[in-house]
Structures are given as C-alpha cells and as structure tokens.
Image (cartoon, helix red, strand yellow):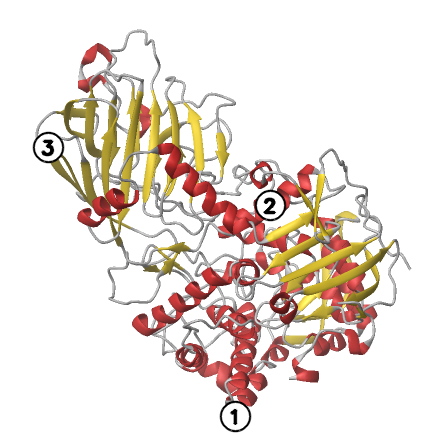
Amino acid sequence: MHYFKIGALAASATWSVAMAGKIGKRSFDVFDYVDPLTGTSNGGHVFPGATLPFGMAKAVADVDDPNEKQGGFASGDSNINGFSHMHDSGTGGSPSLGNFPIFPQSGCPGDIVDNCFFTKTERASQRINGSIEAHPGYFAVSLNTSIKAEMTVSNHTVLYRFTFPLNQTGLPNSPLILVDLTDLPDSITNGRVEVDEKTGRLQGNGTFAPSFGIGTYNLSFCADFSGAPLRDSGVWMNNRAGSYPKSLRRVADGVNSPPLPAGAWTQFNATEDNEILVRVGVSFISNEQACSNAEKEIPDFDFEDILSSAEDAWRDKLSVVEVDATGVSDELQTVFWSGMYRSMISPQDYTGENYLWNSTEPYYDSYYCIWDSFRSIHPLLTLLDPQSQTLMVRSLIDIYRHEGKLPDCRMSLCKGFTQGGSNADVVLTDSYLKNITLNVDWNTAYEALVSDAEVEPLDWSIEGRGGLGSWKEYGYIPTDDWDPYGVGPFTRSISRTVEYAYDDFCIAEMAKGLGNTQDAEKYVGRSSNWKNMLKADQTSFVSNTTNHPNSTVDSGFVGFLQPRYLNQTWGFQDPSLCSPLYNFTSCYLNSDGHETYEGSSWMYTFFVPQDMATLVTTLGGPDTFTKRLSYLHTSGLLYIGDEQAFLPVFQFHYAGRPGLSAYFSHFYIPSQFNTSTSGLAGNDDSGAMGSFTTLAMMGLWPISGQNVYLITPPYFPEISVTNGQTGNTATVRNVNFDPDYEAIYIQSATLNGEPYAKNWIAHDFWLNGGVLELTLGMNESDWGTGAADLPPSSSTSF
C-alpha cells in the first residue's frame, strides 16, 4: 500500500555525465556545490569563512548583530567591525572566540591618527551588497569604505589581503590597520599588546572565557605585514590613539564591563599596488609560538599559494565520495555537499597547542558538544575520514588520562557543560565497533567508560554523570534526587535516565568485544532502566496540532516517560511540554529547567535505540507504534532542528516499515534543509545539521553506538564511498531512480548480486566494499518487513 505521497521536487539534468567504471561520475567542480553561506542567518550560526578541514585558524568578517554573530559572520545587513582568526561554527547560546580582530582603514581624516576609528562601534562598516564570496578555504567581502578584504588559511595562521581604493576623496593614501584586544563575547579580562616600531609587527595575548563552560583560556597572536613601507605605529585605548608607548595592557577594573577597549595599530605609507597582506598566527602557548607558527606555515606571504593548498586539502577530503547526479536538482546537490563540508569544520585540531599537559597524543578541541555530534557527525567522519576520526578518538582518551573524565563538551581548552548523558561513551563505542584501531588504546578507553558509569565526579555539570547512587539503587534518576556526592543542575531526570541507559548499553558492547562478559551482562541489564520511567497509563492531550489548530485533542496514544520520585511514586510533566506546540523554549540547561532537555517526553519516549523491539511492543505493537511515530512527525510535535529528532525519522525500520523512513527523510529534506542563508532548521551545531542531511541523502542511516545502518534509497541514482582504511569502494545503486522522488520505496535488494532482505547493513559493507542495489517503486512493499529482517535489539540478539 502507498500510505504517503511526496510532492515532486524540481529536477533538471543540464550537465554532462562522464562514465568511470560502473558509476557515472559527473565532470564538475565540487566547489560549485559547496555553499558556506548556507545557514548564516535566522539562527543557523554557521561559520562561512576560510578554514582547513578541522583547522584551528578560522578567518571571517565579524558582524555586530548580537543575535547572529556566533559564527562571526552573518548574512543580512548587520555591520562588519573586524576580521578575526578563530571561530566555532553553528553553536547556540553565547558567541565564542573571535579573538584579536584586526580592521583596515584607508587613512585617517586630516592625516591625524586620532581621527581614525578605533572602537567596535565607531569603526563598524556596511558591507557592499553582492560582494561576499565564500568557498572552501576562502572568504571575501567589500566594505562601504571601498576596501576589499580577502582571507585564506593554514592550520594556525591566517593570511589576509586588503585591497584599498585607488582614488580616495578626503583621505590620505596612508592605510592604518589596528588590532583590538577583545573577542566576540567581550570576555577578555587581561590583555597585553605591543608593536615593533621597526617592523610594525603586532603581537599580544589575553585571557578569555569560554562560551558554554567554566574557567578561562589564554591565547596569543602575532601579526606581520607585507606590501607597503611602515610609516608609524602605536597603541590606542577607548577612542584615542598615540605613537607612544608601544605597548599596553587591558585589564578588568571592576567598573567598566567589559574593560575599556584597547589595542595597537600600524600605519603605512602609500602602497604601490593598493594591497597590504596581513599574516596572523595564533597560539594557545605563547606569542613566540604564534609568531613561529606564522613564519613556518606562511613564510612568503604568497596568497595564491596558500589558497591553493587550502583548496587542495578540501578537495582531498571530499574526493572519497562520488555520485551519479543524473536528474538531481542543483539545490539538492548543494544541500548534500555543503552538509558534508560543514561536518568537517569541527572538532578542531589543536595538536601542539595544549598548555594544560604534555603529551605526544593528538589533541582536538571544540567538541561543541558531543551531545550534538555523537548522533551524526562522528558516524559520518568514521565513514568518510576514518583517519581524522581515529585522531579524535585518541584525543578523547588522552583527555581522560589527564583530566580524569571524558568530556561531553569542550572548547578552548576548557570544560564545557554536560547536556545529558556521558555521550563520549557512544562515540568511543561506535568507533570501536567500526574498526577505528590505529594506535588506539582501547583498554584505557574502556576504563574511561566504566569511570563514567561508576564514579560520580564532584561537578557533574561539566563531566561524567550525576545521580549515580540512585541510578544504581533505583534504576532511574529520581526527579527529587538525593545526591550529596556531586553538584549539577537537578533537572532533566527523564532525558538523563534514557541517555544513561543507552550509555550503559554502549559500555556493554565494548565490554563484550573486549571479553569482559561479566561487565557486559551488568551494563546490558542497566540499559533497560528506561522502563522505570515509562508510565504505562499516561495519556497525552495535545493543543494546536497541524490538523486541530486552536483546540486541544486526545492524541489517542498511551504510555509516556514521566517524572518519578525517590519513593517510587509518579509526578507529571505534560508529554508535549518543550515541543513546538507547548512552551518550546522552557527546557534548556538552567536550574529551573524541566525533566526533559530541549525536547518533549513525546520525543524522548522513542529514545531506546538499544532495544527497539521491546519499545515497539511496549507502545502497542508495530501498527500502533507506526501510527504514533507518524503522529510525532505530522502533528507539529517534533522540531527537526534539534539532534534528538534525527533518529525518529528512521525508526519505522524497527516496526517493519522502512518505506516510511524513506518518506519522512524526504518530508524534511529539502523543506527544512535547503540552500538559502536561512536554510537550516536550527543551529548547525558544529555540523550536526549538515551531517544529518548528508547521511540521510546517502541512504544508510547509522545508529551511533551500534554496528547498524538503516537502509533507505539514496537521493541519487548511485553513490560510492572509498574507504580510507582499506581503499575499497562501496556503492549503493538505485534501480528505477525517480528524480521526482515519488518512487522512493524499496521493492527488493541485492548485495553483490545476491538477494538481500534485511532492512539494515553492517559497517563491513563500507570496509570491504561491494554493491548494494535497491530496486525502487511507487508503493511500499514487503521488503525488509519480516521479523528476521529488522535491526537487532538487546532483548533479542545481544
């Protein structure tokens, strides 16, 4: 039966297709389908600037819109007040990084330095419409001062190229470039800057606060210039400047908050070709290392050479995927490749820049946050870039060695806040199950997982888990928990319970693989604790649903996760609370939050990926489960812009309805994910939204923490991935591909020419290579619907 029908998508086939082997490879430049500006407005907070894959240096123009500057730049009409060298991408909440912005001016009115503009407010300039250009490794924008700014990067260094106007009215041809001792959130508490009067070199350092964590971090910079003779230099404070002294400090005075603005400047005589190049190295270690990074990485100020190297790095990362895009619209191709690109912006490689401890292991940072990234970013990296994923895994294990706990969130060498469970447990287990092995100490990794499960830290708001005493005694996190052993926000008892249960299942999987049978049995038992907060008779009345606006109706479904107290009695939280239909923004990480985090009980009741067989039965069997899951998607209860919503798109597989997973994938793409600057459903969260679209369009959705991929048809006639560990190529091919996406239902499948009935596949397919061929039709079929065809569950196959 054909239960759902999708509206046709615009499709065109105006490009040529060159055949290479069995896959049709389109002869195109992948950069034509990577748009870094997607998600740079309406809360997407995407960083669109110049970066290497996972690079530390990230350069872009910074805007003055307080609600949209988390990624530095935002599309729209906000002003530009600086160009800074480090950023995060797609984060919510407060902005981060954006340290030591520089800003160019063609000259000072009256040729008086004091007449230049120094503070953020005074120097803010409008962008010229249509001047923005962004592609991997490059960003450019022109200001209404007629200055064009271009930038590219190496790993720790940015190279800016400022082109000044040929003929200026009322200004001398004497460019001035300043540096500001600040960052995007104005968090600096102690800054120092100096200028070399012989060379014009600017260097300095500061102490800053992370945006979603505790503590402070130190950062240094070193800026050198090329292209014009030095005229003068000095420092500035507030809106005044002078040639002497040649250094100053900016400190918190207890009155001005933030401290008075201050920095340094270098001024030049007329340029020969109206260009000045600025090389800015950054380092967490010292000024000396910042300068050394810059001198080693960009010794010759060769902009085109550095840009070419950055572009090559991106082409290499994206080259492991090949698609036959015949009939697929340019928009969908751009959604696909842009999502893949954004998934490789973070975490960031800070190896050699960690001043907290000495280690020969890699160090990655800006895990922002693993609660967001474990579901899709890391599984995608395991597929496309297992080498980088291996380095990240080793970094996580090394953080445990020196900090005593795995992080759930980490940025700028600081501990970030934990949003739910100990989700690095899932990342490590997922990697363990998928052959991430090179130089990985899995025994220490397992030790770290057990520490999360057994040892409560003093401050579980930033690492590990809280409430472990109750977890072990009662099998759930009580809403009125008694926990004198650690501190953290005593909220989210429902979402923490289901996340802890899944974390324990992941530990059980690694224990089993390492031969720790007793531990495996213990933790798989604890993975059933989700049942202890499921109130079987709880009903749900829902207001303002898609089909019943301005009214409240009985959803018709029963059994929801509910608050539960130490004395075993039940509390009540409306199952729709914190959904788009009811107080959507009331479940954040604060002391007066509710019992679910960034989502409703309606949604969290489906989070039992370890034992979906039991959940399907508990919620009334396959038919009722399917109706209930469909209602979640179609009623308005689900917000796809939070990462917990990703898995429910594909959970129809567990009820024997894989066709509905395919349908709901298209339900959201491209309606909620498109190529506009507002083309994301929510914050990109360091590439989480991008990795969701890429994985969904590839057709094999990973269950993070398990060796399971749920099969749906790719959005292309054919897609191939070459594995970075084995060199083998795995191909998923659609027979009867329909570019209007009406025929999206699998009728039959073969794996390497043999019939394949399961609606899921293991990671061996990606490692060993082969061809999975899917024959498609207009209606759902009986493919993948039998009991033996369903994905594994802990209650049936552990």
**Where is 168 relative to 344, above or below?**
above
- Taking depth in this image into account, of 302 and 734 the one nearest to the observer is 302
1 vs 2, front mark: 2
Q: Which element carries disc 3, helix, strand or loop? A: loop
Mark 1, residue position? 518
Residue sitting at the far top: 169
Q: Is residue 597 left or right of residue 669?
A: left
Residue that mark 3 sits on: 246
Q: Which residue lies furthest to the right in this view?
A: 1
Q: Give whichever of discs 3 and 1 has the lower sequence position.
A: 3
- Residue 664 placement (x, y as % from top left): 74, 54
Q: How many marks overall?
A: 3
- Residue pointed to by mark 2: 337
> Pointer 3 and pointer 2: residues touching (CB < 8 Å)?
no
What percent of the width, then of the height, locates residue 323? 67, 49
For the C terminus, the image quarter is bottom right
Nearer to us: label 3 or label 2: 2
Q: Residues within 10 Å of mark 3 (few under 14, many from 20)?
A: some
Give the residue at x 43% y 74%.
Answer: 466
Q: What element carries label 1?
A: helix
> Which residue type does callout 1 highlight?
Gln
Q: What residue type is labelled 2?
A: Trp
Whether residue 170 appears in this view of the structure is yes
Q: Upstream in the sequence, badge 1 or badge 2?
A: 2
Is residue 461 visible in this depiction of the protein?
no
C-alpha span from label 3 to label 1: 67 Å
Answer with left or right where residue 749 lies relative to residue 476.
Answer: right
